[in-house]
């Protein structure tokens, strides 16, 4: 798929299944992320790949965090929370990891890290890999942060769930450019 087609047609895919992207495809996706705009070339990010047996460990972490918040949580709700970690054969955790800099504020570094995830989503689409960016309480929970080794200075800015597209993909509507863009 050419670059403009990928940019114009990217769509999130929430239903994915195994297998996850093969090593070459995954490398292409990550390389796309690393080409985000990056003020000062600070590389203010890092990424964790969670797959195979680690997915169960992520599910356990989500469950432990939820139990800490709600000790009387029902087994059904707990199973639903665990299942969230197991929705895809690959979960890429996007971590904004700002670097001290006199001119580049932390907010800009977060924007740059977000750009990396967006580039990865577009690359995944171009390569026919289903992907969706999710956050939610498990992106901020202290138990999850600690379990994933996220420092106080860092933030989990998203989980990219990736895998083989499983089912129909949402049809896109034509965007109205004039709704968002004005001459000034
Ligand atoms: C920072 C961020 C966090 C998001 N978190 C969630 C989430 O937790 N759950 C969810 O269903 N969608 C979440 N989304 C939205 C989806 O990734 C997706 O963009 C949305 O469903 C619209 O689909 P589209 O990307 O195909 O237009 C998030 C998007 C962003 C940018």
Image (cartoon, helix red, strand yellow):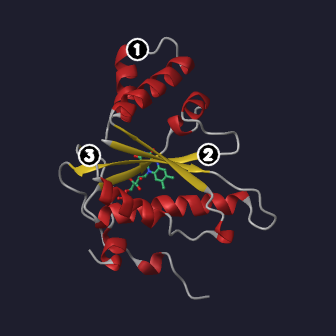
Q: Residue 156, image x and y in percent? A: 56, 45
Mark 1, residues whose alpha carbon is within 10 Å: few (<14), some, or many (≥20)? few
Q: Which residue is mark 3?
A: 15
Residue 30, position as x, y percentages in the image: 43, 59
Q: Give the crowd class for mark 3: few <14, some 14-19, many >=20 residues within 10 Å.
A: some
Quadrant of res 75: top left
Give me the disc on residue 181: none
Vertical relation: 89 (above or below) 44: above
Query: Quick one: SS at disc 2?
Result: strand
Looking at the image, is mark 2 or mark 3 earlier in the sequence? 3
In the image, residue 103 sits, relative to residue 19, either above or below, namely below
In three-dimensional space, the C-alpha distance between marks 3 and 1, rounded to whole angstroms, equals 25 Å
Image quarter of residue 9: bottom left
Q: Which residue is mark 2?
A: 155
| Residue 24 rendering spot, x and y as whole percentages | 31, 59
Quarter of the view holding residue 87: top left
* Residue farthest along the left direction in this orientation: 167
Q: Which mark is residue 74?
A: 1
Dot 3 falls on a residue whose secondary structure is loop
Q: CA distance from mark 2 to mark 3?
A: 26 Å
Give the x, y percent position of residue 59: 41, 28
Q: Residue at x 28, y 64 (%)?
A: 127
Gap between marks 1 and 2 measured at Cα = 29 Å
Which quarter of the image is occupied by the N terminus? bottom left
């Amino acid at each position: 798929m050419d670059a403009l087609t990928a940019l114009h047609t990217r769509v999130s895919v929430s239903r994915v299944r195994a297998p996850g992207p093969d090593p070459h495809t995954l490398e292409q996706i990550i390389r796309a992320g690393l080409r985000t705009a990056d003020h000062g070339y600070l590389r203010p990010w890092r990424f964790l790949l969670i797959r195979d047996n680690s997915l169960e460990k992520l599910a356990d972490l989500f469950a432990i965090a939820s139990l800490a918040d709600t000790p009387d949580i029902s087994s059904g709700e707990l199973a639903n929370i665990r299942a969230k970690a197991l929705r895809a054969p690959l979960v890429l955790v996007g971590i904004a990891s700002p670097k001290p800099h006199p001119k580049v504020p932390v907010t800009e570094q977060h924007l740059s890290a977000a750009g990396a995830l967006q580039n990865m989503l577009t690359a995944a689409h171009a390569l026919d890999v289903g992907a969706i960016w999710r956050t939610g309480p498990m992106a901020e929970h202290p138990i999850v942060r600690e379990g994933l080794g996220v420092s106080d200075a860092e933030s989990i800015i998203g989980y990219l769930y990736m895998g083989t597209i499983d089912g129909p993909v949402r049809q896109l509507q034509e965007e109205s450019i004039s709704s968002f863009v004005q001459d000034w």
